[in-house]
Amino acid sequence: MTKAIRIHAIGGPEVLSWEDVSVGDPGPGEVLLTHSAIGLNFIDVYQRTGLYPIGELPQTLGMEAAGRVEAVGEGVQTLTPGDRVAYAMNLGAYAQQRLIDAARVVKLPEQIDDHTAAAMMLQGMTARYLLKESYAVQPGEFILVMAAAGGVGSILVQWAKMLGANVIGCVGSAAKEKMAAKNGCDYTINYQEGDVASRVREITGGEGVAVAYDSVGKATLVASLDSLRPTGTLISYGSASGAITDLNIGLLAQKGSLYIQRPTLGTYIRNRELLETTAGDLFDVVGSGQVVISIGQSYPLAEAAQAHRDLEGRRTMGSTILMP
């Protein structure tokens, strides 16, 4: 037996239950992992609340973790017991041990420790596809990053600076402004204290930004659209303030022939080749020290409910890990 956080009903943080679970032996193509650290992400909240369906309950939440291979199933040739590995976008991470498809995990290089890996796999690979595939940022371009002091935002800002962008970071407090500036933002905007789009126009000489990366969702949709230059792009990749359900597509024409995308990491790591390329890029920039993963807080896995409350209350900065 092992321990895991499970949900038996959709709801608030109170539905997260610390339980005994049975794992079993790995089947063909599977490995048994012992987790050393687990990542906390807003997708966990979306699944807990039912915004993202996860199938028949009960379910173990969590989409990323790092750990050690304990045993391998028939046909697994790329991994052996003792290997340090990590993964993202695989439901069931809120557990001390789990079974997982061997094709969905990647070996960790020596320079990436387990805590860092758990804090960066989902968020870091998200930052990578946002900057290189959703919209390929070019040197000298102005970009807007909403939630610039959050987990993805902190990585996104640093990586964007590597690519030569001029980064405007939008945050919700003075403390988060300081963190966003430390991460490399050329300009910071506290959306609690003024009109975001007006400030963006001032910074960019009236032009607007090439792209707005927005994980906040409903509350910042208009501000992000109004910050774009003509033919600019909004990448809406999260819904921390609620889902966008009433977008009039005609607004894109009215506001300057704009583009909009609603991506998900799963699409960009949907096969082994894409996973290895995306993870490899992340390992390179973190391993070289060009991008620093900031773990702002950690919680015992058994206290996942409090971690969810703090994440939803926007009381966290950087990445958050859960310790099994």
Image (cartoon, rainbow, N blue to C red):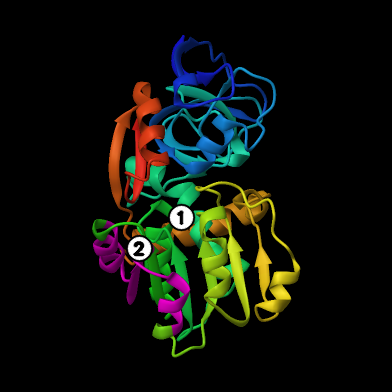
Residue position marked by numbered label 1 in the rendering:
124
Q: What x and y, as percent, mark residue 133?
A: 61, 67
Residue position marked by numbered label 2 in the rendering:
291
List the single residue furthest toward the bottom.
205
Q: State the extent of the magenta-drawn residues as a range.
A: 176-201
Q: Is residue 155 left or right of residue 73?
A: left
Residue 279 at least partly seen: no
Residue at the image position 70 percent from the left and 79 percent from the top: 257
Q: Are marks 2 and 1 in contact (CB under 8 Å)?
A: yes
Q: Kindly identify the amino acid type of the residue bearing the numbered disc 2.
A: Val
Q: Secondary structure at mark 2?
A: loop
Q: Is residue 314 left or right of residue 23?
A: left
Foreground pick, 161 / 66: 161
Foreground pick, 119 / 109: 119
Q: What x and y, as percent, mark residue 223?
A: 52, 67
List the single residue furthest toward the front.
194
Q: What x and y, as percent, mark residue 321?
A: 36, 38
Q: Earlier in the sequence, mark 2 or mark 1?
A: 1
Residue 208 at least partly seen: yes
Residue at the image position 31 percent from the left and 71 percent from the top: 184
Residue at the image position 47 percent from the left and 84 percent from the top: 139
